[in-house]
Image (spheres, rainbow, N blue to C red):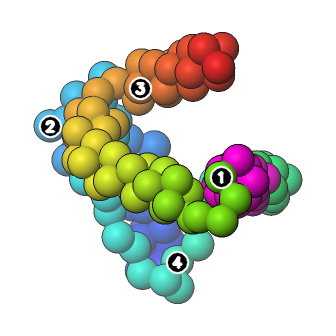
Amino acid sequence: MGPEVVESASMLSHLQGESETSSQYSEDAPASRPLQQFDTDETVENAAPSGNIKRLYISHFLSTWNSRFFEFGAVLFLASIYPGTLLPASIYALTRSAAAIVLAPSVGRRIDKGDRLDVVRTSIGMYVFILSAR
């Protein structure tokens, strides 16, 4: 076997979790395993299908579009309620930015240390609760 075949077999066994270093990490927390870096010349044969990647990009685009559209609309709405002054819109934007700065570390810590499925369920539940409270 040539060196390329051995490297590919080694990389494939590592991706399937059969390497000697995977035994020291918990199977319950695959996110706790360190990321492995590979040479850019190597290709992984088990990559995600291109249809799923396209759907992921479309979903991200639409989600970002929705968020930006809401932010723009909220400022226009506040400007129409309080004509002649942009103070309420400025206070709204400042409060929103300050909340993001203050809460980002705790939210990031929760995402990093918590069970990923539990974090996703909690965030969806909070989102639905906030939308229903309006």
Residue 105 image point, x, y percent: 23, 47
Contact between labelled residues 1 and 4, with CB atoms less than 8 Å apart:
no
Mark 2 / mark 4, whichever is N-terminal: 2
What residue is shown at x 50% (from left), y 61% (from top)? 87
Asked which secondary structure carries label 3, the reply is helix
What residue is shown at x 70% (from left), y 47% (from top)? 81
Asked which secondary structure carries label 2, the reply is helix
Looking at the rendering, the stretch of residues picked out in magenta corresponds to: 61-81
* Residue type at numbered disc 4: Glu
Residue 24: which numbered mark, if any?
Answer: 2
Residue 106 image point, x, y percent: 23, 39
Residue tagged 1: 82
In the image, is 119 to the left or to the right of 32?
right
* Residue type at numbered disc 2: Gln
What residue is shown at x 66% (from left), y 65% (from top)? 84
Asked which secondary structure carries label 1, the reply is loop
Q: Residues within 10 Å of mark 3 (few under 14, many from 20)?
A: some
Residue tagged 4: 42
* Residue type at numbered disc 1: Tyr
What residue is shown at x 39% (from left), y 50% (from top)? 95
Of circles 2 and 3, the one toward us is: 3
Seen in the picture, residue 83 relative to 127 is either above or below; the reply is below
Residue tagged 3: 119
User: Could you give the CA–CA distance between mark 4 and mark 3, rounded to whole angstroms?
Assistant: 33 Å
Q: Residues within 10 Å of mark 1 (few under 14, many from 20)?
A: few
Asked which secondary structure carries label 4, the reply is loop
